[in-house]
């Protein structure tokens, strides 16, 4: 079982909100991790969006709009990236990441389609 | 502002060693506030962390690649490098270099953050 699992794809309408999940493997408690989120558009490197551990331990990436926000669902053992007021430019691949035992682990990525 | 630029051969033969360099401009690889890292992305697939180096030379590698990877730093040239030995077609990917800052938290102590600055990436194909 992968350390981080993301749904392969998600579709949402312009102006709506999209909730992208990043589920941690059983036995790895989401509450103890800082979850990092990246956006990647075709032909470009990933761009750091934000970090979320708790409401008192979070960070917005430089220049990242406030309509991108992070949270957690402890019951699902998952980190969540919420994108509100979806725009066509938000169509991209989104990756979550954690530092686990001094190593970096990425989720498999979610392709967000805005249509 | 800090910029990273990857360079190296775009084509490597199977069983040979892939060698890439990342040149840091607008900042110093000798800064004690960052890790310097390599990440790769096979065509159409997700991101895979390869490893990182601190300016002192200390390293940490992805366990799945550890036996084949060496990351080094040249502070005089403000560069860090990646060597991946015994390559196969599975190593065909876009290779990115990236910077990771450190932070301090009273409860956690020092911890590494996000990959906040990335190079544009360089495509490496393994083929005879």
Image (spheres, coloured by chain):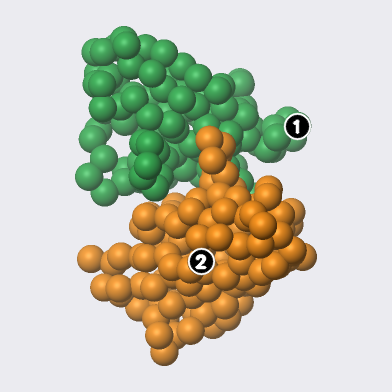
Chain colours: A green, B orange
**Residues beneath discs 1 and 2 located on the same chain:** no
Looking at the image, residue B45 lies above or below residue A91 = below
Q: Is residue A108 above or below residue B29?
A: above
| Quarter of the view holding residue A83 | top left
Q: CA distance from mark 1 to mark 2?
A: 35 Å
CB atoms at circles 1 and 2 under 8 Å apart? no
- Label 2 marks a residue whose chain is B
Q: Residue B67, relative to residue B108: is it above or below? A: below
Residue to which mark 1 is pinned = A1
Q: Residue at x 53, y 35 (%)?
A: B44
Front residue of this view, candidates B92 and B119:
B92
| Mark 2 burial class by Cα count in 10 Å: few <14, some 14-19, many 20+ | few
Q: Which residue is mark 2?
A: B9
Crowd around label 1: few <14 · some 14–19 · many ≥20 (10 Å)? few
| Residue at the limit of the structure toward the front, as seen here | B128
Q: Is residue B31 visible?
A: no
Q: Residue at x 61, y 66 (%)?
A: B18
Position of A44 with respect to B64 (left or right) is left
Name the residue nearer the viewer: A75 or B79. B79
Name the residue at the bottom extreme: B76
The image position of residue A104, as x and y in percent, is 59, 52
Quadrant for residue B17, please give it. Answer: bottom right
Q: Position of residue B119 (x, y in %)?
A: 38, 59
x, y (%) of residue A16? 29, 12
Residue A36 point in image, percent of width and height = 47, 42
Query: Which residue is located at x 26 percent, y 49 percent?
Result: A62
Q: Is residue B12 visible?
A: yes
Q: Quadrant of the N terminus of chain A?
A: top right
Is B127 in front, or is B85? Answer: B127
Q: Which mark is residue A109?
A: none
């Amino acid at each position: 079982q992968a350390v981080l699992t993301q749904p392969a794809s998600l579709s949402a309408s312009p102006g709506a909100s999209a909730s992208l999940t990043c589920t941690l493997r059983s036995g790895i408690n989401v509450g103890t991790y800082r979850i990092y989120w990246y956006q990647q558009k075709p032909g470009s490197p990933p761009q750091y969006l934000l970090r979320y551990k708790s409401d008192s331990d979070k960070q917005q990436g430089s220049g990242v709009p406030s309509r991108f926000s992070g949270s957690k669902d402890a019951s699902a053992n998952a980190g969540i990236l919420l994108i509100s007021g979806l725009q066509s430019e938000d169509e991209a691949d989104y990756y979550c990441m954690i530092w686990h035992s001094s190593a970096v682990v990425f989720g498999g990525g979610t392709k967000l389609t805005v249509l | 502002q800090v910029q990273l630029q990857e360079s190296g051969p775009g084509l490597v033969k199977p069983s040979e060693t892939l060698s890439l360099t990342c040149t840091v401009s607008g900042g110093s690889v000798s800064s004690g506030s960052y890790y310097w890292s390599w990440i790769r992305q096979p065509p159409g697939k997700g991101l895979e962390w390869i490893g990182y180096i601190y300016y002192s030379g200390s390293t940490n590698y992805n366990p799945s690649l550890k036996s084949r990877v060496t990351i080094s730093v040249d502070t005089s040239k403000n560069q860090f490098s990646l060597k991946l030995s015994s390559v196969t077609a599975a190593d065909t990917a876009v290779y990115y270099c990236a910077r990771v800052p450190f932070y301090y938290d009273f409860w956690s102590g020092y911890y590494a953050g996000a990959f906040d600055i990335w190079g544009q990436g360089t495509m490496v194909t393994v083929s005879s």
